[in-house]
Amino acid sequence: MTEPTSLTPDAIERLTADTEPWLSCDDCFEQVDAAVEGLLGSSAPLAEPLRVHLNGCGACLEEARSLAALIADEQELTPTDAVARLDGELAR
């Protein structure tokens, strides 16, 4: 049997977050590339369903952050700045 682990405050927040308007992970993965490129390239805001989903889904959020760091150089940003811009948009 495995030892139980405690939930972190971040995990609790994600599990109890309002996820409306709803977006599936598949839909998120279809939209995230263009959305992150738009955010980093022109500061276009994320669509509300995508923003809500990323705030509630750790796997999709990690994908979006990885993508932001990966394409940062194309947008003349450091990976840290690109991820910070994404995180700032998610916090709005």
Image (cartoon, helix red, strand yellow):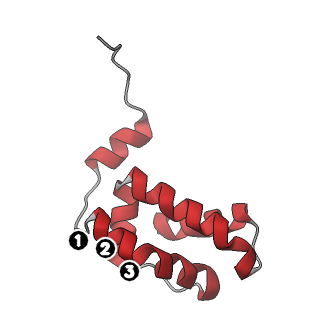
In the image, which disc is placed on residue 6? none
- Residue count near mark 2 (Cα–Cα under 10 Å), binned few <14, some 14–19, many ≥20: some
Quick one: 49 or 92, which is closer to the camera?
49
Vertical side of 43 occupied by 85: above or below? above
| Residue in the picture at 33% in, 64% down | 53
Image position, residue 17 (x, y; %): 29, 53
- Residue count near mark 3 (Cα–Cα under 10 Å), binned few <14, some 14–19, many ≥20: few
Labelled pair 2, 3 in contact (Cβ < 8 Å): yes
State the separation of the CA atoms marked 2 and 3.
Answer: 6 Å
Q: Amino acid at mark 3?
A: Ala
Mark 1 or mark 2, which has the lower sequence index? 1
Task: Indicate the quadrant where residue 50 lies.
Answer: bottom left
Q: Which quarter of the image is occupied by the N terminus?
A: top left
Vertical side of 26 occupied by 57: above or below? above
| Residue in the picture at 22% in, 68% down | 22
Labelled pair 1, 2 in contact (Cβ < 8 Å): yes
In the image, which disc is placed on residue 47? 3
Q: Which residue is mark 1?
A: 21
Q: Is residue 10 left or right of residue 49?
A: right
| Residue in the picture at 69% in, 72% down | 72
Image position, residue 36 (x, y; %): 53, 76
